[in-house]
Amino acid sequence: MNSLPFERRLEILADSAKYDVSCSSSGSNRRGAPGGVGSTTSAGVCHTWTADGRCISLLKILLTNACIFDCAYCVNRRSNDIPRAAFTPDEVVRLTMDFYRRNYIEGLFLSTGVTRSADHTMEQLIAVVRKLREEERFNGYVHLKVVPGADPLLVAEAGRYADRVSINIELPTRRSLALLAPDKPREAVIAPMRQVSDLIASARAERKKSRKAPPFAPAGQSTQLIVGATPESDREIITLSEGLYRRLDMKRVYYSAFVPGSDDRRLPALPTPPLLREHRLYQADWLLRFYGFAAHELLDEDRPNLDMGFDPKSDWAVRHLDLFPVEVNLVDYEVLLRVPGIGVRSAQRIVAARRHARLGEAELKRLGVVLKRARYFLTAGGRYLGGIRLDGAGLVARLLAPEKRPARLDQLELFPAHADASALTGEL
Ligand code: SF4
């Protein structure tokens, strides 16, 4: 594998890494040390995002795409006949420093296939980041993949050097993992997640006592779930995500539409990746994290899947018309957040502005509140802004009309030629 020319290996290993969407450089604040190189503080850091929110200013690469495991959904699985390549830890360090100095990247996202054993692979990943930090004095952002099943001592070491770590849960249930990734028992994924969560919490507590206490994965941990490779409902997926956010203090759960391309009979025959479903899951996830929704409010036994034609917040509102319209000058911030079309920033602006003046339609527009959908759910100064019957059939048609779907239904490129509608960051 290492006999291939360096550029060819770079091509193979960067291409293989694009299927892992769980990288993001937000939330880290590693200061530059005197004599060191790089910094993740906001000044001087260039963030660029792909259309669907993936951060591309990192060098995103695999140490190797060879793998002793055979996860059915993975392009790098043992049984897949693809060109294999590997870098040495020193080569990854050199590449990172070269790219960083040329201002091509703001940091490194390093993942890998599993070679020899989970521990051996983890040691190789740690060798990269240790050398970057200790020898190159690199203070830029590093997101390191934790290999499921790695020794807890190695997991602890990874978090001491990396800004963020991620352990990909990949599939929502124990049953599906056993079917498609038999080499990765669920416990091998959940145990390091729990360990990382505990170590982050204790490092935070220590740093409250002393700023000299060493940080541990200061940008938190994230994970990735593959959508559509197995039969779980959106309800199962969103309920799992809610548990990960609440119980393991997960920073982000990334949803990755299953990319068909294998004739493995355990996998569904999909014509294209289910990107619209991925998009809806991101919207529902947004509601969990920023809008105060609980998973059971969005989906239940009778409605186990998100509506593909309707964003989940509008869908919830239409099912709760008895709560609307609400008076924009009176209702709590939490209620404003439940109005379709009113995002976090608009709700904050409304709450701040109404302390000084009574808000009508013109004032809302001046505040930059987009009323396209919100108007059907609001009164302002006692006047209903919708103009149609709230419980009439026309409401759904009007709400559906402006819905913007992702234009592309194929796998998104890591470096797209043109920007596309955001699937990750849009407010609802
Ligand atoms: S362990 Fe990771 S790299 Fe290896 S086949 Fe499974 S998902 Fe792919």
Image (cartoon, rainbow, N blue to C red):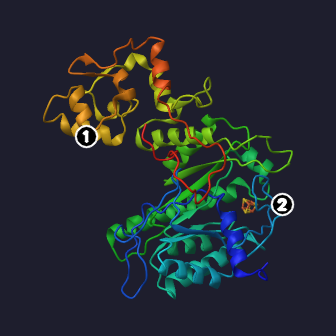
Disc sitting over residue 349 in the figure: 1
Disc sitting over residue 80 in the figure: 2
In this rendering, would 148 be left or right of 352?
right
In this rendering, would 185 be left or right of 320?
right
In this rendering, would 417 be left or right of 359?
right
- The residue shown at (58%, 59%) is 193
The mark nearer the N terminus, 1 or 2, is 2
- The residue shown at (46%, 31%) is 313
Q: Position of residue 425 (x, y in %)?
A: 46, 47
Q: Position of residue 404 (x, y in %)?
A: 51, 35
Pick the residue in front: 224 or 204: 224
- The residue shown at (48%, 81%) is 101
Categorize mark 1 by other alpha carbons within 10 Å: few (<14), some (14-19), many (20+). some
The quarter of the rendering in which ligand 1 is drawn is bottom right
- The residue shown at (49%, 19%) is 397
Q: Position of residue 275 (x, y in %)?
A: 63, 42
Q: Secondary structure at mark 2?
A: loop
Q: Amino acid at mark 2?
A: Asn
Q: Amino acid at mark 1?
A: Arg
Camera sees residue 250: no
Q: Is residue 340 above or below residue 131?
A: above
